[in-house]
Every structure is written in C-alpha cells, then in structure tokens.
Amino acid sequence: MKNIFLFILLSISVSCTAQIYPLRTYTAVPNNAYIKDLNNELLPYEGTWKGTWNGKTIYIYFKKVKNYFTHLENNPYYKDILKGKFKVIDSNGNILFDNSNISDENVKIWGSGIRKLDDKYSLIYVDPDLCNTSGNIIINFIDSTKTKLNWKLNKGSNMITTDCQYYNTTPFPQALPEEMILTKQ
C-alpha cells in the first residue's frame, strides 16, 4: 500500500511539472508549457524610459512579468513578457495621460515576444480609454550599453464610432508617439 501511494504521488508530481522552453521558442509548445526568459534577455528592458515628441515628455515603465497565462487556439501556456505603463506630460507640466498606477492585469501595453526575423521586441497596444485605439509597438536597442531604445508604433485600423467620447474631436488625442528614441533613466 505504501509503494502504491508513493507511486501515485510521484506520478502526480511529474505530471504537474511544466516543460520549460527558452524565450526564443518559435514553435508550438505543449499545454501548460512555460516559455521562460532563461538568459535574462528581458532584464535590460526593465525600468523607466524617457522620451520626447511634439513638446511632450513620456515616461514608459517596463516590467518583466513571469508566468503570464495566455490562450492560443485552446493551448494554454505560460510565458515571460514585458508589460508597460506610461505617463505623458505636456511642455507646461500638465499630465495628459497617466496609467502608471493601474494593475498589471489592466496594462495597455504588453509584450508578445522577440521577433525571429530581426531580433526586435514586439508589443501590443490597446487603449480602452481612447476608444480602443490599438497598434503594434516594436522596440530595439540602438546602443551597446542598452540605454537607448528605438520605438515604433504601427497603428491598427482603428474605427472610431459615434459612441466614442472623442468622436469628431480634432485632433484626436494621441497617447503614444509613432516614433521616438527612449533613454533609460
């Protein structure tokens, strides 16, 4: 009886252990696998970044989040990603946008991974406060010390409907720039 109990306990513990894959895994993984930042590639991105555009200053706060649960065609798995929060200030010091205090579950910027094609990190942006404005952000280091990031936002095909509080607002509020250089603070 004791041997049967030990065998069952061992079987359960082995089946509960997720298979771990490196961050740069570009193939399908089994259910409950963990795509982990084994080489700390996301570490240099973490922290506060500052940039300017059109007389505005932006602070972006990137944080690595472990064990992020996602669904992809009924294939749940865990993955280390970056999540971003931001604050935008105009030239007079007025805060235009600030989501730096929201929970990690409600961030407007979250990572999808390092692109195989060009080694750049890809993020998704969806802003429910701006009528679900969305886009894809690509960031990459432009110096060997990893203190400068190139930022490019490719806006999605955003349909602004009459129920949007900014419908017919000119210019439409822009929380994030399309291009800029960020410097680590």
Image: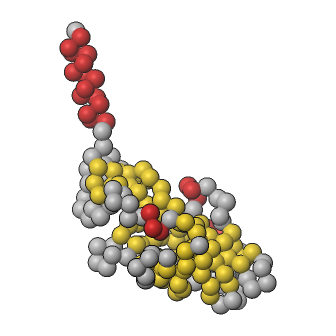
Find residue 12 and report its image quarter.
top left
Q: Position of residue 165 (x, y in %)?
A: 71, 75
Question: Is residue 103 in view from this perspective?
Answer: yes
Total labels drawn? 0
In which quadrant of the rendered image does the N terminus lie?
Answer: top left
For the point 28% across and 23% down, which residue is it? Answer: 9
The answer to whether one can see residue 156 in this image is: no
Relative side of 126 to 165, left or right:
left
Q: Position of residue 119 (x, y in %)?
A: 33, 75
Q: Quadrant of residue 21?
A: bottom left
Q: Is residue 4 left or right of residue 135?
A: left
In this picture, residue 82 sits left or right of residue 103: left
Residue sitting at the far top: 1
* Above-or-below relation of 44 to 34: below
Q: Position of residue 122 (x, y in %)?
A: 41, 72
Whole-percent x and y of residue 164? 67, 74
